[in-house]
Image: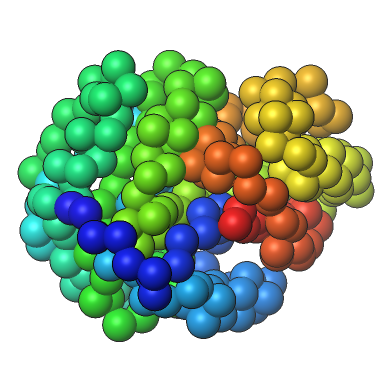
Amino acid sequence: MSVPPATHIARQPVLFLPHGGGPCFFMDWPGWEKLAAYLKHIARTLPQKPAGIVVMSGHWETSRPTVTTAENPKLIYDYYGFPDHTYKLQYPVPGSSALASRVQELVRADGLPCDGDSARGLDHGVFIPFMLAFPEADIPVVELSMGQDMNAAQEMRIGQALSPLRDENILIVATGMTYHNLRHFMSGSPQTDEVSRRFDTWLSAAVEAPAEKRNRLLLEWETAPGARICHPREEHLLPLMFAAGAAGDEAGVHEYADTVMGKALSGFRFG
């Protein structure tokens, strides 16, 4: 999928969006109001309506890079123990086999494999935040997996390979969480709350550093204060590496900041 060059089409930014906790925006769960408001405002900040969206979430891992190819992707309710109505949420967004093919073309041109999956749907790391950010469900969405080996450098490389899509009016989105330790999330522990703030401060400074330094720091994220307490496993942080790669030389901006259940959470924008 390619949009012919045109002077009136501006380059799309790259977004790292916190996707919240399960279906948190669609139930009685106080604390997520500021994030909901931020997500609802996203579309108005874009230069124009995207022709499509490529998204990586913290909820799909494969042995090889893989992209969804279904024209009408189903929803995957991959959260557990929530109210019955949250398993009936609908987001009838189209997919795009043409956009998926373009993703495969760019990734393969960089020397990496990229498979297609016609059966895979969109997980809650995609449809839950997108229900707020793009409620009309009329922008085609394809989802890209992350590697099971949690290779941060490869996710950044894939983001770099897909950067040209931004000039084709394709929005690149990463969703995850800048804090993801479920054991501590609702503990009310002042100690782990402070650890989350220290890590979030480091991460925000890293994202806002000049691109070369930013990428180096992000790849060394485990050296940050409290890194492994905030991310015992890094699947919710690695989409940020993908976003940073797609950003190229453009600066990162700490666009959303909040404290939810004592833990610092952030969202970022590039370009």
| Residue 226 seen from this side | yes
Quarter of the view holding residue 223: top right
**Is residue 39 depicted above or below 168 in this figure?**
below
Q: Quadrant of the C terminus?
A: bottom right
**Is residue 213 depicted above or below 76 in this figure?**
above
Residue at left offset 75%, top offset 63%: 257
**Left or right: where 89 falls relative to 80:** left
Quarter of the view holding residue 48: bottom left
Taking depth in this image into account, of 194 and 5 the one nearest to the observer is 5
Q: Residue furthest front?
A: 7
Residue at left offset 29%, top offset 19%: 112
How many marks overall? 0
Whole-percent x, y for residue 188 in the image: 81, 53
Taking depth in this image into account, of 223 and 209 the one nearest to the observer is 209
**Left or right: where 74 falls relative to 111:** left
Taking depth in this image into account, of 194 and 73 the one nearest to the observer is 73
Whole-percent x, y for residue 109 in the image: 26, 25
| Residue 261 seen from this side | no
Whole-percent x, y for residue 210 in the image: 76, 39
Q: How is the image coloured?
A: rainbow
Taking depth in this image into account, of 109 and 145 the one nearest to the observer is 109
Quarter of the view holding residue 126: bottom left
Residue at left offset 24%, top offset 60%: 4
**Is residue 134 depicted above or below 189 in this figure?**
below
**Left or right: where 90 falls relative to 74:** right
Residue at left offset 54%, top offset 24%: 152
**Left or right: where 174 falls relative to 147:** right
